């Protein structure tokens, strides 16, 4: 059965291993399945919910697109586009926002986390952007959405909006209610310096993450210095679960090799830390370094990246505009 898959990545710049393993690697795998129709978006409208430097934002949009392409997303097989170049997303978000309910948004934990203690100073956009995310998904009749733990709640909101619209306007199945796609053999990627914190570009220490633009020497150095403990490598899950930094490194190795944690534990039990870290660095170099080289090559050709986004955005607008027009007819415009 064919799947219509939609997902997006914010152009926040300096994408790292967590972004790759958590999203982009999965995008490439989904594209390989012939029955899948994949649409991947650089969600710059989401990015401006917090203040952006215009020049840096432009650079980050191109960089995110370069990461898509360098990682193996093929614009002849998948639609790659820029959210702000498709006006139907904003129009669709307004129409669906009139169906969504305040109580639903008030439950969004990510707003509380991002807004912090002084939420009165947060932008309105940051509060309502889950509705824009719903429009992103629903305008393409998406059947499946790859999501991580931090996006599950937003997908539930999307499903609530779709169901309510269909019910309110007595148009059963008009808005497709999407299903989540959860990666198999994926571990949440944490900081190399603190196994209790998510790997993040905002961490002050560059040693806390593997950037997708890191070269071989940087990868080796960061893995060698990654925080561990003095105990022997584990023989079972129970021992590993008590050791957050080691569990993170085992999770990285497992995720990049598409294998279970149990397989990784069995592969390295009885061996020493240096042997494991050397193998992890070697694997990361094999998988990440070619992407890094290609990213830097693509960023030198801005016209090519802009052409990819322009073509993809035209394809996306053609699809999304039809859906918005249908929504407006149903509403009574």
Image (spheres, grey):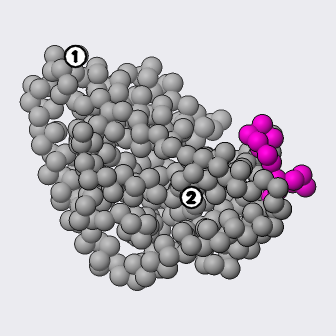
Q: Secondary structure at mark 2?
A: helix
**Closer to viewer: mark 1 or mark 2:** 2
The vertical placement of 301 against 312, above or below, is below
Residue at 40% x, 55% y is: 29
Quadrant in the picture for the N terminus: top left
Mark 2 burial class by Cα count in 10 Å: few <14, some 14-19, many 20+: many
Q: Which residues are magenta?
A: 227-240
Q: In the picture shown, does residue 301 fall above or below 273?
A: below
Q: Which residue is mark 1?
A: 168
N-terminal label among 1 and 2:
1
Percent from the top left, x then y, of residue 111?
53, 36
Residue 209: horizontal and vertical position, in percent? 66, 62
| Depth check, front residue: 316 or 89 | 316
Identity of the residue drawn at 27% across and 48% down = 36
Q: Which residue is mark 2?
A: 256
Name the side, left or right, on which 241 lies relative to 179.
right
């Amino acid at each position: 059965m064919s799947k219509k898959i939609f997902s997006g990545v914010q152009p926040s710049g300096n994408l790292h291993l967590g972004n790759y393993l958590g999203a982009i690697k999965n995008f490439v795998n989904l594209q390989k399945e012939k029955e899948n129709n994949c649409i991947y978006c650089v969600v710059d409208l989401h990015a401006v919910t917090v203040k952006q430097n215009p020049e840096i934002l432009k650079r980050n949009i191109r960089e995110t697109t370069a990461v898509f392409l360098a990682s193996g997303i093929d614009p002849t097989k998948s639609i790659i586009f820029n959210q702000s170049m498709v006006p139907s997303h904003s129009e669709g978000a307004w129409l669906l926002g009139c169906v969504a309910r305040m109580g639903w948004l008030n439950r969004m934990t990510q707003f509380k986390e991002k807004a912090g203690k002084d939420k009165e100073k947060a932008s309105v956009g940051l509060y309502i952007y889950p509705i824009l995310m719903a429009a992103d998904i629903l305008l393409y009749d998406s059947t499946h959405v790859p999501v991580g733990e931090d996006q599950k709640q937003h997908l539930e909101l999307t499903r609530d909006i779709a169901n309510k619209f269909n019910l309110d306007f007595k148009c059963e199945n008009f808005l497709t209610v999407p299903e989540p796609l959860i990666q198999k053999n994926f571990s949440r990627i944490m900081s190399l310096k603190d196994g209790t914190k998510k790997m993040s570009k905002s961490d002050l220490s560059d040693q806390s993450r593997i950037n997708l633009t890191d070269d071989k020497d940087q990868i080796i150095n960061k893995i060698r210095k990654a925080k561990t403990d003095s105990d022997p490598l584990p023989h079972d899950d129970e021992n590993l679960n008590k050791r957050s930094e080691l569990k993170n490194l085992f999770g990285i190795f497992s995720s990049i090799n598409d294998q279970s944690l149990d397989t990784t534990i069995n592969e390295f039990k009885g061996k020493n830390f240096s042997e494991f870290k050397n193998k992890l660095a070697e694997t990361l170099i094999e998988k990440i370094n070619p992407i890094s080289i290609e990213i830097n090559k693509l960023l030198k050709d801005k016209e090519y990246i802009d052409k990819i986004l322009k073509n993809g955005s035209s394809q996306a607008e053609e699809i999304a505009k039809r859906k918005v027009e249908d929504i407006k007819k149903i509403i009574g415009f």
